[in-house]
Image: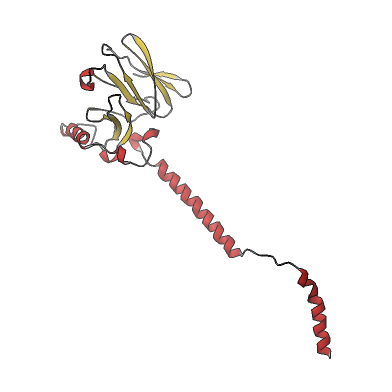
Amino acid sequence: MRTERQDELVRRLLAPLERVEPVKLVSDDRGRRRRRSLALAIAFATAAGGLAAAAVSGPLDGIFSADHPRRAVDVLDARTAAMLRSDESRGDRIGVRLLGQSRLVGTLPMGRRVYVVPTSKGRLCVVIQRLAESCSEPLTQPVPLTFTVVDPDRAGGGQGPIAYGVARDGVVSVSFTVGGRRVTVPIHHNLFVFQARPADRGFSAPAVRLANGKIEALR
């Protein structure tokens, strides 16, 4: 009899719990796994950003259009590579061209591709496909641009000389005098190209305009 009364008392005490809706709980372990996954995702994104930033270095540093993992279009064709190797065979003092690090930066009006190629001695070479190369010290803030003129005979097609060069990030345009007139050429993807008239001669030293509006003359 006593046992029956105790059972009845227990049922009365538990009766209010029958009206309580169940609540779905997220396990603490699941939360920890989620946090770990998020931390790994952040670490991976950070690592990926580091790889992108380190796509190029040395002489190619500061040239945004070249700052990417190497692609098929960045590879020099066999004739251009042979031209550069021939230059080295003549006792070039700027070092071996690191052809495996070449990057495409643009194209000349005649259709020839323009590449940047570093050397083993830290020089920067601007290479025109199967035509010419010009090598210099890497671009810096005091000297943020290369400037080369290809004469009409080498340019071909009966056209005037071509001035071209590669600029460091932050250079907006380059200006110079040729044929008695002042010319300003915009920089696109770190490259400028100017097709002069057949009679044009005597290019002056260039001046660059920076993104902050400052103009600097180069020598």
Camera-side residue of 160 and 90: 160
Q: Which span is picked out in magenta?
A: 92-96
In magenta segment, residue 93: yes
Camera-side residue of 207 and 131: 131
Left of 25 or right of it: where is 178? left
Pinpoint residue 123: horizontal percent, then vertical percent. 29, 32
In magenta segment, residue 208: no
Split into 4 quadrants, where in the image is the C terminus? top left
Q: Quadrant of residue 140?
A: top left
Pinpoint residue 97: horizontal percent, then vertical percent. 24, 36
Depicted 217 relative to depicted 24: above or below: above
Depicted 32 relative to depicted 126: above or below: below
Q: Quadrant of residue 206?
A: top left
Is residue 35 visible in the rendered structure shown here?
yes
Is residue 146 visible in the rendered structure shown here?
no
Q: Which residue is drawn at the image coordinates 37% and 41% (left, top)? A: 55
